[in-house]
Amino acid sequence: MASVWLELLLWMYIYVVIKVTGASSCGQVYTPTPVVLAGSPISVSCSVEENCPLTAGKEFLVQWMINNQFVPRNLTYQESNGTYSVLIPRLQGTIASIVCLVCVQDCQIVDGVDVKIRNLPVPQNLSCALTLVKMPSLRCDWNPGQEIANLPTDYTLHIFRAKSQKIYAIPHGQHFFVVPREAFGYFSELEISVTAANVLANTTSDPLNFIPLNTARFDPPNITRIEAHRYGCLKYSWSLSEAQKWLQLTFIVQLRLKTVNNQPNKDLVYTSRQQQINTIEVCGLLHWTDYRSTMRVKYCATSEWSKWSDLKTATTLKMAPAGRLDTWLKVNNQTAQLYWKPSQQFRANGQNLSYSVESKETKKRLCVTAETYCYFNLTKWDKKISLRARNEVGSSDHNEVPVAVHRNKDLESVSNFSVHPQSNTSLDVIWKSPAFSNVTSYVLEWRSLCGTTAAPLSFTLIHKNKSNTTLTGLEPYKPYNISIYPRYVKGIGRPLTVLAYSSEKAPSEAPELNYEDISHSRLKFHWDEIPLQKRNGIIQGYTLYFWHKMNDIKEIMTTETSVEVKDLQPHTKYHALLSIRTMGGCVNGSVLSLTTGRLDGIEMVLFVIPACIGASLLVIIIVFTCFGKQERVKMCLWPIIPDPANSSIKRWTTTDSLQGLPAFKEDKDPVLVYLSHLSLLDMTEKEHFKSGYVKENQWPDDMNIHADTQSCDLELERESVPYATVLFSTPYQINSSNPPAYVRSESTQPLLAGDEPGSPPPPYENVPRGGAVSALNRFSAFSQSSQSEEESDELWEEFPMLRSLEVNHI
């Protein structure tokens, strides 16, 4: 039974989940705002999907519920196809749950939204202030917040006193109220609140508790009188404004004093509590000093200050100067420069100060001036001088400043002295103390280089244990000479000086570029340094841009004030631009255009004459070389080639054959040239000349051929020149029994005495020759022929090399 109930509950749960899931995917509810004011209308719409399983193919109805209560049907309407809306006139409570339902047989929730309801806003920032005039009044103001449109709100002001209560209705649209005088007392504590109400609800602000007089803001007071009744003091008499003089109260008074003419004193503020019938005395002021004074008042600590009164000026009483002066004495032989300035303890006690310098030894007054420096001469007896300040009242003896005269000024100096910019108006100064020395103090002096030459320097005294300080009050972009001196018991150390700027920028202008010594190939530029007050920094260098074509600009960097440019083209227009730079930037000058000169007659002569002289010397050297080395030059230029027409082999030696070759390192004795063998051509008797030509390929059968004899095959129709080479198998002898052999040459070089141009030379064959052969039987083939002796002689004429081979007489 229990299992049946469990199964039934499970099926019901699944059914509800399916129904809720299906319904949740059917539509969505939209509202213009999630928060509405109480009593304000609101419109809500519900969009039903087309594929909703609850409404597919069915007729359905859309209904609305607010906080589980059905909305009347007259407030709902169909806005468009699938969109249904409801207009709710007003909502109540703090939150409203609005739900959209789709009803077929039963109703299913499609979607819903929660709308917060804000009630009537609470008045905020309630404040009240008492106005003290002839008719005192108390005014209270508040902030109403965001009011509901078209819904009027009424405000009331509630005032609670110890034994009474007042309620004041506030006119519509007004968010302040002036409380009548009978409703409050100056010293009685009040509790005030504001209530806002409409037809829906009402709200009340937080209560405000206060004493009316504590909220009063007084008018600026008047300083009626200032009296300098004693040294260093001023007495002030004051009163409230005319409309508030009737108040006989105790006030908090604040007095502010400031020195005139930018004297180095800060604002002085004195606060006291007193009535206006009393006076205020302020002491500890400078003597004979103008002070501007102003005053303001309030009633208690929680009250608001009045505005400052008008400025009044007063002067303290005169008195002789008091305090110590810082001094710096520089001695150069018998000339002295004394500088001084007020220390922190010095009091001028007057305006028209003057100073006198006197010598202790000679009792002589050296200088009287109103400046803070003095130049005078010293004698060798002056060891100590004194400085005294005076004003209109006089000078007192206790403010006399003794100054020791130290003539020794070549003692040891500091080291590692450097200056670095810290800001636009200050510098960091660093140094290292001298080693093994007894330094009493340091003097750091600086002088602006842009002032006049007589401008005094500034200095400061530094404790002996310090090795750095900061200079302030400098002008940016101005040069300063900064020096440091170590002071010893018996003298002054050597100074170290640097040029420094607190800040740098580009120079104000660039130097004007000029040129001189211009020629056709060189040009020299020069310029002047710009004034010191226009440099705005330490000059790092100059850059000269020089060009005649924009794509070929030469850049020359230098630290000098002149530069020379060489290798220029004659009669060419050039342009130049000078740039000057500092650590703060650079500036360019104007462009200078100029043209180089032409080559004149003198320059041409000076150029041509050395060229001619050089060329002449070169020719002379070559000629003498040729004459001195004639044979070697001749062999190099015209080597000796033997003439075959006028040559004889028996005269050929190694020396002759080497004349046209370069000389060897070692000279050797000439030796005879021995040919390898001699080949002679013997023609058969059966062969005959035909038409002046000799047949080829006719070699004697009984020729004595050496083992290394070479044979030459000639083509019949080849055009060749008849040369012959004689080869010997042994050194040539007069009575040689072996006839030499001749080998045909394959050279195509024409003979010196050739035939007519265009006619091929007659071919020939090498023939053997005997020891004593006549003109008729020099060729064996010719002895059998019927040719005449003249014809044979003509053949010898055609073969001069063969004729030269007759060695009968050797």
Image (cartoon, grey):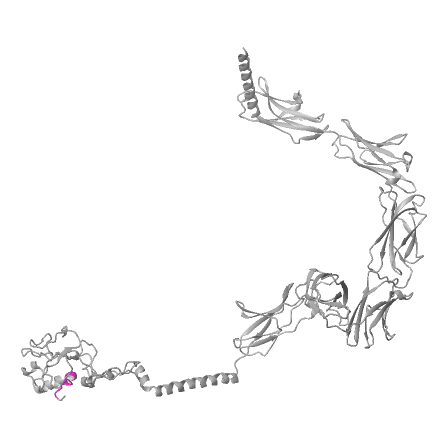
- Spot occupied by residue 793 in the image (x, y as percentages of width and height): 11, 86
Q: Is residue 690 left or right of residue 92?
A: left
- Residue at image position (90%, 40%) is 136
- Spot occupied by residue 144 in the image (x, y as percentages of width and height): 78, 35
Q: Main secondary structure of the magenta part?
A: loop
Q: How many marks?
A: 0
Q: Is residue 27 left or right of residue 309?
A: left
Observer able to see residue 170? no
Which quadrant would the C terminus be assigned to in this image? bottom left
- Residue at image position (20%, 84%) is 645
Residue at the far bottom in the pictured view: 809
Q: Is residue 610 left or right of residue 60?
A: left
Residue at the far top in the pictured view: 1
Q: Is residue 81 left or right of residue 486?
A: left
Q: Is residue 83 above or below residue 489?
A: above
- Spot occupied by residue 473 in the image (x, y as percentages of width and height): 75, 61
Q: Is residue 279 above or below residue 665?
A: above
Is 455 magenta? The answer is: no
Q: Which residues are magenta?
A: 801-808
Instruction: Please state which of residues 581 and 346 is positioned toward the viewer in this rendering.
Output: 346
Observer able to see residue 412? yes
Which quadrant would the N terminus be assigned to in this image? top right
Which quarter of the picture shows residue 112?
A: top right
Residue at the far front in the pictured view: 436
Which quarter of the picture shows residue 34?
A: top right
- Spot occupied by residue 582 in the image (x, y as percentages of width and height): 64, 65
Which quarter of the picture shows residue 145?
A: top right
Instruction: Please state which of residues 769 and 43 is positioned toward the viewer in this rendering.
Output: 769
Is 804 magenta? The answer is: yes
Instruction: Please state which of residues 266 and 8 is positioned toward the viewer in this rendering.
Output: 266
